[in-house]
Amino acid sequence: MEWLVLLSVASLTAIYICWPHSPLPLESASEVERLRDQRNNLLEDLTEINADYAMGRISNDERTIGRQIIAPKLRAVTERLRDLGETLEVLP
């Protein structure tokens, strides 16, 4: 009788492990959306800094400082998205 219970538990465990799961749990899916939004905002900020520099609104030093602030955040968000299996477009 004990072997039957043990066999049942082992079988259920094997079925659970082998059962196809969705690629991203619901909480990871919401994290992906949040990270996508954050990445898009950072890219917009970077584009805005470059446009402001091109129009002469800010100096090269201000542009450099802005890029130094944005770049590490953008890199971290992009790496986290890749860790979650996201394929990201290559920027020109």
Image (cartoon, helix red, strand yellow):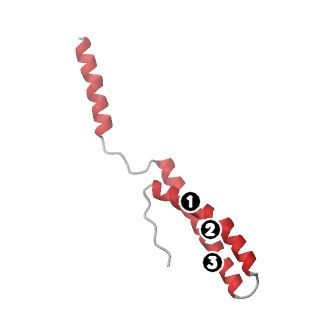
Looking at the picture, does residue 26 appear above or below residue 89?
A: above
Report the residue at 62% width, 62% height from top. Answer: 72
Instruction: Tell me which corner region of the image, top left, top right, bottom left or bottom right, holds residue 44.
Output: bottom right
User: x, y (%) of residue 4?
Assistant: 23, 17
**Viewed as shown, does residue 48 lie left or right of 5?**
right
User: x, y (%) of residue 58?
Assistant: 76, 81
Looking at the picture, does residue 34 appear above or below residue 55?
A: above
- Please state which amino acid type lies under the numbered disc 1: Val
Q: Which element carries disc 1, helix, strand or loop?
A: helix
Report the residue at 46% width, 73% height from top. Answer: 90
- Whether the residues at callouts 2 and 1 have beta carbons within 8 Å, the answer is yes
Label disc, if present, on residue 77 of the rendered structure: 1
Mark nearer the N terminus (2 vs 3): 2
- Please state which amino acid type lies under the numbered disc 3: Thr
Instruction: Please name the residue that numbered disc 2 is placed on.
Output: 42
Per the model, the C-alpha gap separating discs 1 and 3 is 17 Å
